[in-house]
Image (cartoon, rainbow, N blue to C red):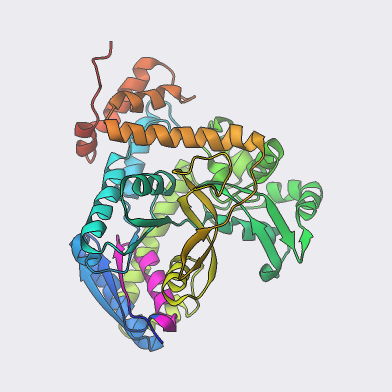
Amino acid sequence: MATPLKIGIIGAGSAGFSLGLVKDVCLTENLAGSLISFMDVDGERLDMVHRLAARYADEVGADLRFETTQDRQDAIRDADFVINTAYIKGHYHARAMRDITAKYGYFYGGVSSGGAETYQFMLDVCADISRLSPKAWLIQTQNPVFGGTTLMTRETDVNVVGLCHGHYGVYEIANVLGLTDTEDITWQAPGLNHNIWLTHFYYKGEDAYPLLEKWIAEEGENYWRTHVAERTHDTQMSRGTIHQYRMFGLMPIGDTPRQGGWWWYHTDMETKRRWFGEPFGGPDTPTAREFYVKGNEERLAEIKRVAEDTKESVAQHFGTEKTREQHLMIIEGLVNNVEQYVRVNVPNNGALPGIPDNVAVEVPAIVNVKGIQPLRVPPLPEKIMYECILPEWLEMERSLLAFKTRDRSMLLYNVLQNHQTRSYDDACAALEEVLSTSGNEDANAFWQYPAELV
């Protein structure tokens, strides 16, 4: 018997994600009769998503209702699930900030406006849920999943789970190794969000790490010399990722190889291409950013074209197979007791040894009507804990302390600690120009020095 729900999507103007979620709901018979509430501040995108969703549901014969709103509280009120995918500043603002910091010699990261708006938005969403839908689950999709999930589960009583799809990098490894029967792959990659490590890797019951070693020895060099990435994030089998495997002893998965603290991979464009391949040098370069933004614009234009062409089949255009996203898996498990095996970001509570209970970890979990039940995993190797996991945890804690205290000097400390910083004066100038730039007015007012610096 179907269980009708209300699912609120915050930041629904991200058309690709929203339509993927709609497709998954439409193809889940147990959710017939559900209401999808799209919320975004961009009314034009909301209308476009609504029209496409309604047409898709009609074409596949799904019993769903849709509504749109620019009021976040309307989408949250009486919801069973709230999915937060809102990117507060957006890609164009991020690109403008990178252009500013480049003037001071920062090629890769180094200067941040602190993310206070994002953290506060997360807490505001939780406050709305506590007041309007206290039993709802919040599925946090937008970054920072690590810091955000930790903050919300510490500071609120809302049921929060963070999701990321970086763990699917395991299947990119399998594809390159020629392991085509993905259902025969058994694996585990625990850690922190964007910092996960392949502790177990089996194919048809046999350890698959020797297959990786064989590929490195026999095919690695040719792959790195000839492989041309078609996606900015195509780095899972790059020279840099394999180098990290050699350094730390386990394969880093998904976004893990991008770690900013490993500065030696990110000093300039030539270095980035050496480690992460042609033509982009990984996702964090000017070339990749321009390609990514252009790709977003092209996808949005194509979605808009389909929305305006009422004769075109939406189902044919977007397909009739479910996505790999885990949102509906979690909803199905919690509501209809369709037991699922998922990878989630939740408070540790003993799941990953060596990490405090109130810190969000990324671990496997069983989801059913009893809830989201994280599985206890073996300890990560000490080397990875000391060189990768604990430094990331400390950095996250500093960001939360800075947010709670509004301490501008903590932002400056982060800049001063960056290997790209040439002098104290440059660090101060770069931070102040970022904070004083259009679009950062709220951040500039939020952050205060505890005392005058000399």
Front position in the image: 155 or 293: 155
Residue 14 at what x, y percent from top left? Answer: 34, 62
**Magenta-span inclusion, residue 22:** yes
From the viewer's perspective, is residue 432 above or below residue 392?
above
Residue bounds of the magenta highlight: 5-30
Q: In this orientation, does residue 20 appear?
A: yes
Q: Quadrant of residue 397?
A: top left
Q: Is residue 396 left or right of residue 185?
A: left
**Magenta-span inclusion, residue 402:** no
Q: Is residue 31 left or right of residue 287?
A: left
Q: Quadrant of residue 53?
A: bottom left
Q: Is residue 326 left or right of residue 439?
A: right
Q: In this orientation, does residue 260 appear?
A: no
Q: Quadrant of residue 4?
A: bottom left
Q: Quadrant of the C terminus?
A: top left
Q: Quadrant of the N terminus?
A: bottom left
Residue 248 at what x, y percent from top left? Answer: 67, 37
